[in-house]
Amino acid sequence: MNKIKNYINGKFLPPVNDEWIDNYCPANGQVYGHIPNSSKEDVEKAYSAAKSAFPLWSQTTLEARSRILIKISELLEANLQRFAEAESKDNGKPIGLAKTVDIPRAASNFRFFGNAITQFASESHESVGHDAINYTLRQPIGVVGCISPWNLPLYLFTWKIAPAIAAGNCVVAKPSEITPMTAYLLGKICTEAGLPTGVLNIVHGLGSTTGQAIIEHPDIKAISFTGGTETGAHIAKIAAPMFKKLSLELGGKNPNIIFADCDYDDMLKTTVRSSFANQGQICLCGSRIFVEATIYKKFKTDFVEKVKQLKIGHPSKEGTNIGALVSKSHLEKVIRYIDIAKEENGTIICGGNKVIVPGYEGGYYLEPTVIEVVTDECRVNQEEIFGPVVTIMPFNTENDVLQMANKVKYGLSATLWTNNLKRTMRMSNQLQSGIIWVNTWMLRDLRTPFGGVKESGVGREGGFEALRFFTEAKNVCIKY
Ligand code: TXE
């Protein structure tokens, strides 16, 4: 049986308390490995290693840091197949998706920030009339904590680690206990790439123990977190009195707004993807579909027809579109929402049932599900389900749909399908979300600010925003 260990100071170590957690394979529901249930002591060890590595690492030239990050990126690319298989097995996502999205993006994260750090500049301000000049230093914070979720395991883990170490910090990182495998494999790659020991430390374990020890640690000065909104609120409560820097990327309930004047075929194809990619377990998925009344009937028919063509199957099979959901408890949560939809007079127009994949009867499979709702205020339209479930309903005017789009507690992303330029500008200005996609979805340029408003979080990741988050600004004012 597979036994994952912590990566501390460049070594693979068992947890101090010798406690282990089962790791499940979502495709068949069986335990296939064990991971450390790390305690405060393990986190302390990781912190000490990071603290010792910091003085040297923060003084390493930008070119040297850049070279190491790019080397990590190259090694990830060279091991694409192995990492993709591990991700697919651990998470339940189709191997094709892991191979084309998750692992290439993890490699891009390192390459991008390896390059970005060589271009990162700080400001200077001339105080005219005072004979003074100000310049701003951007200094690494010290030891920082990175905590990531299970939906895009290596992709989101590295999205935090890469800018943190590029900026000269040392890291204590925890992947989700549900999907620890690729984070474990990353340790080996970092060593091979020549990352000095202690710069990156990876501790495995539960959120309530290992994660809690990271956020409570008085000397871990910044926390970058992606996960559920409730967890984000909890982290903020713990971290605020210690004045930690916080970046919280939380849940979403994103509108996908379709106007009759859009490029219909492109919209339809993309909407299938933005609804069900990764079994709908992406914080950016457009789970609330609003369609202009004049094309509603046609859209409903065409969309359902396309969704029915999606192949549900074992994630390791090439050609599978919909793999397994990440865990038994998550599958149960999603099914509960389908029941709630029925109680609320929603109509399941496609899917809604568990699927038995022959040979893998214990797996967590669910049909992609489309629910026609009568009001945008029902729970399935307001609460984050985070599974292969979308709602659809018609709208009449731009103003009506804008109201409905904004009437949720989240504000991560929104998708707009229209060819009307003025409407695009009006809607983009007024939609309450951190990211707007017009006539596309999940087209990512890593230089752009990424994050949400309202209960979707605080702070922005990506590009120089991430490098700013992982540095402290210090202004120096010189009178001459
Ligand atoms: O996330 P958690 P869960 C949403 C989605 C999902 C819900 C809950 O709706 O159904 O959140 O998912 C760590 N101190 N998203 O329970 O618990 C935890 O170990 C420190 C949206 O899996 O927030 C894991 O590493 N850390 C989302 C990470 O936080 C703690 C992606 C995320 O776990 C902790 C995933 C604590 N006290 C779920 N408690 C997105 N925005 O992409 C937990 N953790």
Image (spheres, rainbow, N blue to C red):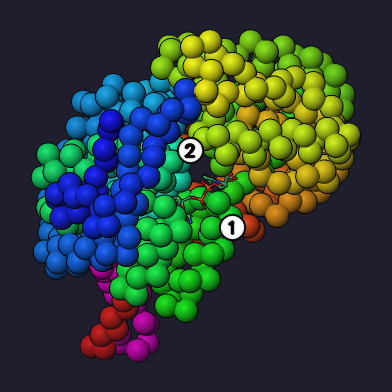
Q: Is residue 344 magenta?
A: no
Q: Mark 2 belongs to which amino acid?
A: Asn
Residue drawn at (65%, 22%) of the image: 354
Instruction: Report which quarter residue 133 is drawn in.
Output: bottom left
**Numbered badge on residue 415:** none
Compared across the picture, whether 233 is left or right of 166 comes to: right
Instruction: Report which quarter residue 141 is drawn in.
Output: bottom left
Q: Nearer the viewer, residue 373 or 362?
A: 362
Q: Main secondary structure of the magenta part?
A: strand
The residue that label 1 is drawn on is: 230
Residue drawn at (53%, 18%) of the image: 361
Q: Nearer the viewer, residue 480 or 153?
A: 153
> In the rendered structure, which segment of residues is drawn in magenta?
125-144
User: Residue 68, how many percent across, how many down?
Assistant: 16, 45
Compared across the picture, whether 221 is left or right of 235 comes to: left
The reply to whether residue 59 is visible in this rendering is: no
Q: Are marks 2 and 1 in contact (CB under 8 Å)?
A: no
Is the CB–ligand 1 distance for label 1 below 8 Å?
yes
Where is 80 relative to 239, above or below? above
Where is 268 relative to 214, above or below? above
Quadrant into which the C terminus falls: bottom left
The residue that label 2 is drawn on is: 151
Quadrant into which the N terminus falls: top left
Residue drawn at (63%, 57%) of the image: 455
Mark before the other along the chain sequence, 2 or 1: 2
Q: Residues within 10 Å of mark 2 (few under 14, many from 20)?
A: many
Is the CB–ligand 1 distance for label 2 below 8 Å?
yes
User: Residue 254, how many percent across, how many down?
Assistant: 66, 42
Q: Mark 1 belongs to which amino acid?
A: Glu
Where is 82 relative to 211, above or below? above
